């Protein structure tokens, strides 16, 4: 395992911290509870944390309206860039405010002003500010955002894509991806009660698992569960890090995981 | 003149867009008016704009409380970093929101996550995202912020310091520094009605002018008029760009300046 012991990446999924059915609607009390769980575990374990979050019903609204994920496709694409960045940063302020209020020394990281992508994949990002923050045991908080893209003009960076790039460079020893389902299922568990959870995904079983995973749902401009699993598996392979997709909408799950509990959700690792 | 014709830097001073006497108090209608003037001139001239703003009564409050400008001086310094970044970014959202509402394709630039300083001076900053934004005629909006500092741990970056670094790399053809006084005076014009405006500062007269300029007032953690003039003169010398300090609290002044009017305030140039 190539992980730097003592650094954990945590994702707060957009579907957890916002109501995806209602534009620009954050879940204030959920965010507050998660901030409390994170700070409690951070104090308890002394680990370094990097905390990413999705955009949910904030940036996904303009990103869908202007199809920002397709690049510069028309005259309106440029206003779409501005609106996506603004919406993503507004939600980030809410999350960072909540973290600071609970005592966490959280600092925003705006990907659109630091990373550059090509066809939606990050190709450059000067991580010195983030490394210096982690050295001070500050908690950097990057978030799903628009990017300047060398190929398409603009693109959307999911938290998984941020984690893929950051993970290869910063080499965390663990990645916890907080979702509103308790792992990866062979069918949509919200639609089919016979859906079964897949406890472990590796390079050995991924090909048999993938066909059962859906693509993006209507509001998800970042590719849905299928692309999330592929990004995390790439990270698991390249950085040798164990990832876990976990239901953090259940109180206590994130804190338990940060304190060392494993296997409650779906683990994604190399082998 | 080494300037790239067609690119103007504009600063919206913290004392203009906030009430420095009241913590966390923005001047909503002033910001809205300035956004309207900027967008109108942007449309009219077709120039590229980079728009920085000061922090005023937002980040200056925690920056003073935790003496963030002195670096990591105690256990509380780290929470100070988080609070300064949060306050600076909150004001930035208000400014960017107002710009977008007026039709400007404005995109935040968070210096603390992209620039690294040493003893308060920026030593590295990957400007590719900003260059790509300017190429699309988006309006990047950096702001006075905290920084990770290689020497002192943390520091405060004024808009002038941002402009000094950005100016050397991006080479604007003009820099407009919007203030609440109509230029540089030989005494504080708010305290002494006999104060006289200095119409032009160059390397020839700067040494006779500087002694009359005050240092920081109580709330200004970024060094006051003296350090502003020195930063702008350095920029004028190194990048061959003409800077002007101008009273943008007077309606129309900023729009006129953007449309080409010069000399209403104090001009700072090499010779």
Image: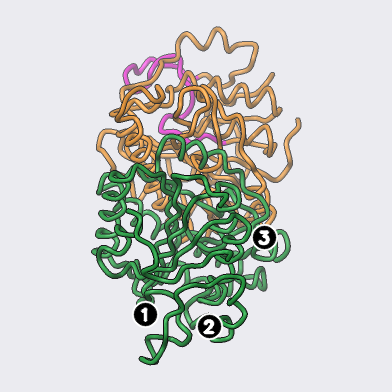
Chain colours: A green, B orange
Residue B168's quadrant in the figure? top right
Residue B166 point in image, percent of width and height: 62, 36
Is B135 contained in the magenta span?
A: no
* Residue A21 position in % (x across, y down): 37, 80
Which of disc 3 and disc 1 is earlier in sequence?
A: 1
| Highlighted range, magenta | B176-197
Camera-nearest residue between B235 and A59: A59
Disc 3, SS = strand
Instruction: Give the mark, 2 or 3, whose residue is nearer the N terminus.
Output: 3
Q: Which residue is mark 2?
A: A213
Residue under the point 25% across and 66% down:
A251
Whole-angstrom CA distance, mark 1 to mark 3, is 29 Å
Element type at mark 2: loop
Q: Residue at x 36, y 69 (%)?
A: A264
Vertical arrangement, residue B130 with respect to residue B65, above or below: below
How many angstroms separate mark 2 from mark 3 (CA)?
28 Å
User: Which secondary structure type mostly characterizes the magenta part of the structure?
Assistant: loop
> What number is the disc on residue A21?
1
Residue A200 visible, this orientation: yes
């Amino acid at each position: 395992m190539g992980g730097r012991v003592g650094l954990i990446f945590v994702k707060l999924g957009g579907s957890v911290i916002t109501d995806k059915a209602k534009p620009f609607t954050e879940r204030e009390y959920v965010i507050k509870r998660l901030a409390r769980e994170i700070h409690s575990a951070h104090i308890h374990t002394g680990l370094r944390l990097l905390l990413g979050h999705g955009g949910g019903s904030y940036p996904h609204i303009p990103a869908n309206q202007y199809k920002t994920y397709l690049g510069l496709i028309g005259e309106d694409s440029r206003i779409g860039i501005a609106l996506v960045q603004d919406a993503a940063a507004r939600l980030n302020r809410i999350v960072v405010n909540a973290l600071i209020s609970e005592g966490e020394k959280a600092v925003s990281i705006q990907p659109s002003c630091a990373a550059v992508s090509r066809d939606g994949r990050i190709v450059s990002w000067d991580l010195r500010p983030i490394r210096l923050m982690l050295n001070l045991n500050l908690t950097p908080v990057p978030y799903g955002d628009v990017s300047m893209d060398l190929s398409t003009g603009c693109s959307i960076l999911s938290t998984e894509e941020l984690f893929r790039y950051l993970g290869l460079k910063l080499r965390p020893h663990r990645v916890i991806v907080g979702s509103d389902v308790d792992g990866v299922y062979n069918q949509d568990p919200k639609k089919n009660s016979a859906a079964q959870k897949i406890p472990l995904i590796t390079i050995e079983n991924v090909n048999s698992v993938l066909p059962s995973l859906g693509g993006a749902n209507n509001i998800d401009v970042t590719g849905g569960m299928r692309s999330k699993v592929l990004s995390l598996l790439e990270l698991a392979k390249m950085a040798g890090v164990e990832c876990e997709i976990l239901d953090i909408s259940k109180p206590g799950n994130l804190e338990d995981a940060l304190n060392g509990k494993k296997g409650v959700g779906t683990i994604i690792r190399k082998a």
